[in-house]
Amino acid sequence: MCLISKNSKMEKAANDIVCYKVLYQGIMTKDYYTPYLFCYVPNNIINGDKCFFAEGRRKIYRHLNKYRIEGGVIHTYKSMEEAETKRRPCGNFNRLIFKCIIPKGTYYFEGETDYASKKIKFVKLIF
């Protein structure tokens, strides 16, 4: 998943930023995974005991007068409604939406309807 941003540099969150994360949950295993990269998300992260940190290498491409950011960040949505538009069924997985925060002091990119950050903290399962 990529994010289109007006800036090629990350901003530092002055306060916690509320956001929404879509995850897959295995129907049989009940394990959680990120869409697109299928990165496993352990229960202690889902429960909010630990933050979820981005892995991989970030790539930034100039795209007309904006920037396309891929990899090395965690993609979230600004609103639950926007996350809901991405919550389509997928084979043997349920697609769930979680309320999260980008913690104060975390570096992030901002798109029109989404964020891409170095880490997030899960707050609660919405549905």
Image (cartoon, grey):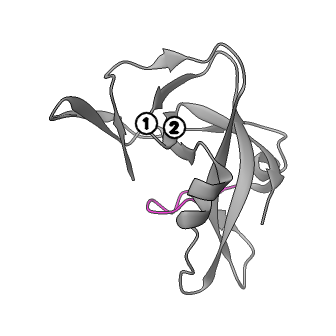
| Quarter of the picture holding the C terminus | bottom right
Q: Using the rendered view, name the quadrant where residue 90 is placed.
A: bottom right
Residue 37: say if magenta.
Answer: yes
- Amino acid type, label 1: Gly
Which of the numbered marks, if any, corresponds to residue 115? Answer: 2
Q: In this rendering, does residue 33 appear at all?
A: no
Which of the numbered marks, if any, corresponds to residue 111? Answer: 1
Left or right: where 69 falls relative to 63: right
Q: Are marks 1 and 2 in contact (CB under 8 Å)?
A: yes
The magenta stretch spans which residues? 33-41
In the displayed structure, would residue 38 be above or below residue 98?
A: below
Q: Residues within 10 Å of mark 1 (few under 14, many from 20)?
A: many
Residue at screen point 78% across, 37% down: 50
In the displayed structure, would residue 53 be above or below residue 40?
A: above
Where residue 126 sits in the image (x, y, percent)?
79, 59
Residue 85: say if magenta.
Answer: no
In the displayed structure, would residue 89 be above or below residue 22?
A: below
Q: In this rendering, does residue 120 appear at all?
A: yes
Where residue 1 sits in the image (x, y, percent)?
39, 53
User: Along the line of sight, which residue is nearer the eye, 3 or 71?
Assistant: 3
User: Along the line of sight, which residue is nearer the eye, 86 or 29?
Assistant: 86
State how many labels appear: 2
Which of the numbered marks, if any, corresponds to residue 126? Answer: none
Left or right: where 59 falls relative to 103: left
Element type where label 2 sits in the image: strand
Left or right: where 36 falls relative to 93: left
- Amino acid type, label 2: Tyr
